[in-house]
Image (tube, coloured by chain):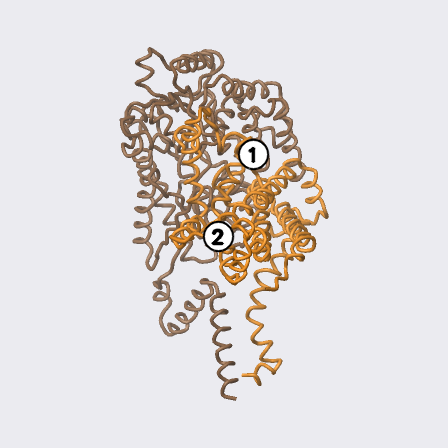
Amino acid sequence: MKKSVTMLLSLFFVASTLLAGCGSSNDKNTANEGNTAANNKPANEAKVSDEPFEITIRHTQIGEAKKFRLAILDDVVKKTQEAVPGLTIKLDGVDSEVNRKEKLRGEMAAGKPPEVFDVFGSPDAELYAKEGLMLDLTPILDELGIKDKFSDLGPFTHDGKIYGLPIGGSIEGIFYNKEYFEQKGLTVPKTLDELEAIAEKVKADGKIPFAQASKDAWIPLMTTNNLWSYYAGADITYGFKSGETKWTDENMVKAIAKHQEWVQKGYFKKGELGFEYADMRNQVITGEAIMMMDGSWANSVFRDPAQAGEMVGKIGYFNMPPLKEGDPFVVMQDSNNGYGFSSAVGEDPRKLEAVKEFIKNMWTDEMQLRGLKEDGVLPAMKMDLEQMKTASDDPLMQDIFKAVSEIGNAFPAFDALVQAEVNTALGMGIQQIIGGEIEPQKMLENVQAAQDAANAASE
Amino acid sequence: MNKALRNPVVYVLFILPAFILFLAFFIYPVFTAINNSFTSWNGISKTVNYIGFDNYVQAFNDDAFWKSVRNNVYFILFSCLIQVPLIIIFSLLIANVKKFKGLYKTAVFMPSIMSTAVIGILWGFIYNPDFGLANEVLGLFGVSPIYWLSDKNWAMISILITNAWQWTGFYIVMVLAAILSIPKELDEAAAIDGATGVQRAMKITLPLIMPIVSVVIMLSIAGAMKAADIVLVMTKGGPAGSTDVMATYMIRYAITSFRHGFGNAIAVLIFVFTIIITVLYQVLIAKRTERIEY
């Protein structure tokens, strides 16, 4: 009998341990809050509101290249915590790709995203907002009076409501080795033909004209996207989703053929399909490659002695030139990455207050200028070019400011305008083009097929 | 003790915790996946549309899917035809060395305790076209540089070699344990009768370790069918999807494209294909090698 009792007791012990392990931390918190609330019943309302509470900020500022951006976030967190009694902000740093494609999606599927999270405007935020998982920021922005201060909230706007705020803006263009250009008597090209002539000279000199790493398809697609925006016009991308324009347009074929021609001519390093993003920058830093198509955000790497070594101060920047001299510069410019907020925040006045305070502290002229100065991220809020120029006297930043001032026609990156599955098909297609497996016409037919399927599914 | 275990209620209570966990973490997800595979669910929406077998039809009509299935088959063939014989040879060699047996065992086991991410980086260096060990060594024989992970003709074999390197040691230790458990008398009797080392290995040891080799093959097949991590860290399924296996195909075409219904259909297909192959293996091959009597 004693033995059976002991066994039963041990069984219950094991079972209860297991069940306790299955309990979620949220439940525990709720339970604790419940107890605290019960204990504090006689206390007045004001005291209850001083109770400690926590919000989590999911950010992607991890690694050496993002240390300045993290420092800005840290300062905003500190200010916000000081202003809101009882608030503790927990920072949760996750790699950008992992957050975007795995972690945040999983949390969204479960309906429990963190209170504040790094998010891409389109198509991600739009989808989450449609499902009612994101907080409508419109009243907060009205209250704070900053709604009209942003350059472009388009990617974060759904049905006229704003669901997220971009942290910064960016343009895509060509970084180049200024010292090499000077030594060889090369000048910044005014047309695409001139750019190709430079590439030929660089190649003849035994160097790689363009650094490239195509293991991730979005990297070579920066070049392709700019090429097709010149050949077929930047507006063509807007029409793919609505069916007004086709990927198989003859000018699109010309653009893809141009990219393929550059590959075949050896303008990129052989084996680019196996290289990571960091390898591409290293090709420039080591002097192996002379030019590189990348986002303006890469300036922080070339201005940091720890990362760029002796190449600091030797790198310049220009926009990809137009087909004909004097034509407007067509440049990718967007602000698609920023912070979004869980709709659950709206149900808790104290958390809502914390979020308001966070927005108030994060999106200021001071912070935008600091981001520009320390991190080289272009402001997401409207700012006079002259004011921007005062933020940094670094020659590379001055080149980027000049490039911004030269933009004749800006377009958002293609992935903000087409469905995710089209992005996948396009990524596959460009890798096939680089690998010499497919002709441009056939590749674009495949992308159009994916586009048609995606359009049909969304109807 | 016996009295307690004779009581059915106690039995049920003992089974219950494990059964609940099994239901929650295996049965429920499997049925949810099957259910979701008939929908066009985007992974987030609360509204779910049932679309019948459309996801399966789409997968079966997609060349890229069959390419990924073919790569899974390569994984299985490489495991069974190259890796397993190597495992047996190395196990026999290590079992018969007189000195440093522990050192050899530890050395071959090491890769299997390393994380796949670390192995991916390590082999990334080995396969580097500019300064990688593989090209350096081949260069000594006048072979021009090979773009291991960038060239679709080499990328898959590069992954297979790395995967084999990671897991061979683990299986060697398993087989080694089987070899060392064979009674010494059998080997000695054969030696006295004049059998050579090779004859003893082929006629005595090998037949006696076949059950464990069978388990190794089963585990290799199951591992090959669910392979994903090594592909993701080495090539991300590239170049241009040439190293995609079913699991990475699912990530590329379904999960990252907000098509969870389609993703669940692929997951179900992986599950079904794995069951079919393992059942076939069990019925056709493994059953014959199950019983060993000394």
The residue at the far bottom in this view is A1
Callout 2 secondary element: helix
Q: Residues within 10 Å of mark 1 (few under 14, many from 20)?
A: many
Callout 1 secondary element: helix
Relative to A131, does residue A269 appear above or below in the rendering? Answer: above
Q: Which residue lies under the disc numbered 2?
A: B170
Q: Quadrant of the C terminus of chain A?
A: top right
Do we see residue A142 in this rendering?
no
Any idea which chain is the brown one in this picture?
A
Any idea which chain is the orange one in this picture?
B
Give the residue type at disc 2.
Phe
Q: Which mark is residue B68?
A: none
Q: CA distance from mark 2 to mark 1?
A: 40 Å
Do we see residue B104 in this rendering?
yes
Q: Which residue lies under the disc numbered 1?
A: A423
Relative to A305, does residue A57 appear above or below in the rendering? Answer: below
Residue at the spot 56% in from the left edge and 21% down from the top edge = A256
